[in-house]
Image: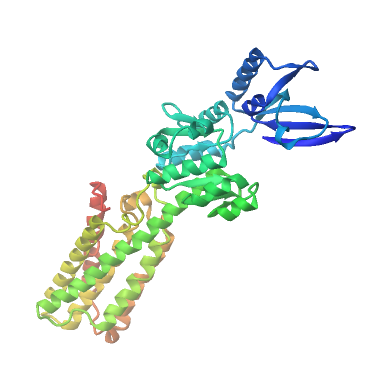
């Protein structure tokens, strides 16, 4: 509610605007056809009925009242007003909000409306933009005041709309959601939104119409004041999170393969399978180009259909670690096999075979590591051009090591037939991982 006082000649006129129910509660008279009469109960009921009718059409309702006084008294300024009427203001939602709400719902993000609008207005707007209202609770600020924090905590998951709320109500709602274990993102633009923005996990202030106080209290500032941008930010966050996990899974498998190969050769009392220069070279190739390319992977199909997860627990689970060890062991066993069958011929040749296989297998496995669920054919080989370039560069560098700098790496150049066979065998890891995806065996 807002009140202004204006001096006109020898008297003062008090003008008030606000929610219809608030203005009506402070009004004693009503002006009808220019005549001021006492505000009767039947007139109040008629006004309330019309307000509800307007509100159900998704109109924001603003009522007006006035009174004349000789001398303004602050304590009595908003008493015994003359009710003038109300207006319905249409503020249509942006077109993109419909799709954004649907996308958020698909992603497991619950959108709750917390508004100062009339209850009926809030319900109408919610239905219009696709918020799920049927079977859900709609609470007003007055109802919020009548229940305890514990009682709110029990029902808050089933509430779709909070209408006619004050700043203290918003804080109460955010606390209730957080106490239920939810990660809460709160949007706001006014000074009165600052407390709720501050205590939310992610406070989001409007950049265009937001006040400086709201921006200061928020964690993020939405430059275009568009809800759909929040959903896009969630999608971008999921892409980044996935692209952090992919190189980790890939590099652990690769390093387990290398370390296990060295351990097996030591346990079997064989000549060292890899020379120090070869180990450094492997890490240069696998830890740089393919790993960096995995971090640049574009969005996967269906990324916004996944439900939210605990980012710490899901980063590296027991399943993920077990699978990484499994892949690393396959890599190590094949590496040792190639080393052993070529060892009687020549130690340098055997090392070249093992060295080339483990590099090629890791580089090829990077292709499959682009997704834990989607196959290479579904992703499309060219959808991540950085990966294509990384594979080409890595293969060229390995061929350079074997055929251009054999003395530096203590290897003997491989025959073309053996090189072709090793390249073919290096595809085994891709076949294993792609088969797992087709069988829908999860590793997280």
Residue 302 seen: no
Residue 302 image point, x, y percent: 39, 45
Residue 263 image point, x, y percent: 16, 75
| Drawn side of residue 55 relative to residue 304, left or right | right
Please state which of residues 188 and 134 is positioned toward the viewer in this rendering: 188
| Drawn side of residue 346 relative to residue 13, left or right | left
| Drawn side of residue 50 relative to residue 422, left or right | right
**Quadrant including the N terminus:** top right
**Residue situated furthest bottom in the rendering:** 407
Residue 241 image point, x, y percent: 40, 56
Q: How is the image coloured?
A: rainbow
**Residue situated furthest top in the rendering:** 42
Check the image and report above or below for 330 versus 300.
below
Please state which of residues 61 and 441 is positioned toward the viewer in this rendering: 61
The quadrant holding residue 342 is bottom left
Residue 193 image point, x, y percent: 57, 45
Residue 383 seen: yes
Check the image and report above or below for 374 versus 134.
below
At x 48%, y 47%, the residue is 185
At x 31%, y 50%, the residue is 373
At x 60%, y 45%, the residue is 192
Check the image and report above or below for 283 versus 39.
below
The quadrant holding residue 384 is bottom left
Labels in figure, total: 0
């Amino acid at each position: 509610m807002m009140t202004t006082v204006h001096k006109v000649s020898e008297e003062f006129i008090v003008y008030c605007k606000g929610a219809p129910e608030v203005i009506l509660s402070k009004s004693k008279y009503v002006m009808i056809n220019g005549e001021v009469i006492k505000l009767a109960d039947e007139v109040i009921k008629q006004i309330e009925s019309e307000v509800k009718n307007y509100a159900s059409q998704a109109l924001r309702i603003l009522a007006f009242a006035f009174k004349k006084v000789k001398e303004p008294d602050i304590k009595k300024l908003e008493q015994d007003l003359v009710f003038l009427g109300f207006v319905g203001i249409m503020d249509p939602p942006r077109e993109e909000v419909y799709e954004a709400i649907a996308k958020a719902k698909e992603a497991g993000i619950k959108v709750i409306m917390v508004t100062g609008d009339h209850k009926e207005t809030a319900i109408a707007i919610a239905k219009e933009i696709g918020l799920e209202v049927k079977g859900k609770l709609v609470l007003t600020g007055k109802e919020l005041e009548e229940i305890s924090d514990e009682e709110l905590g029990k029902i808050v998951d089933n509430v779709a709309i909070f209408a006619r709320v004050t700043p203290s109500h918003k804080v109460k709602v955010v606390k209730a959601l957080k106490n239920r274990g939810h990660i809460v993102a709160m949007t706001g633009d006014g000074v009165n939104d600052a407390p709720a923005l501050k205590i939310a996990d992610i406070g989001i202030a409007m950049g265009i119409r937001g006040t400086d106080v709201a921006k200061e209290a928020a964690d993020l500032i939405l430059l275009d004041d568009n809800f759909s941008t929040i959903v896009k930010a969630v999608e971008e966050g999921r892409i980044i999170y996935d692209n952090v996990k992919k190189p980790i899974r890939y590099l652990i498998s690769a390093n387990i393969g290398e370390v296990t190969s060295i351990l097996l050769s030591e346990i079997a009392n064989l000549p060292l399978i890899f020379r120090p220069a070869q180990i450094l070279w492997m890490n240069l190739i696998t830890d740089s180009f393919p790993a960096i390319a995995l971090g640049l992977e574009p969005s996967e199909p269906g990324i916004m259909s996944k439900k939210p997860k605990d980012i710490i627990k899901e980063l590296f689970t027991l399943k993920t670690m077990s699978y990484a060890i499994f892949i690393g062991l396959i890599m190590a066993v094949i590496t040792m096999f190639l080393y052993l069958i070529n060892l009687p011929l020549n130690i340098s040749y055997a090392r070249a075979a093992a060295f080339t296989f483990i590099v090629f297998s890791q580089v090829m496995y990077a292709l499959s590591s682009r997704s834990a669920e989607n196959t290479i054919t579904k992703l499309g080989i060219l959808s991540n051009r950085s990966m294509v370039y990384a594979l080409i560069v890595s293969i060229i560098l390995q061929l350079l090591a074997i055929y251009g700098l054999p003395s530096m790496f203590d290897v003997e150049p491989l025959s073309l037939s053996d090189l072709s066979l090793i390249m073919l065998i290096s595809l085994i890891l891709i076949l294993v991982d792609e088969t797992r995806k087709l069988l829908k065996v999860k590793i997280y």
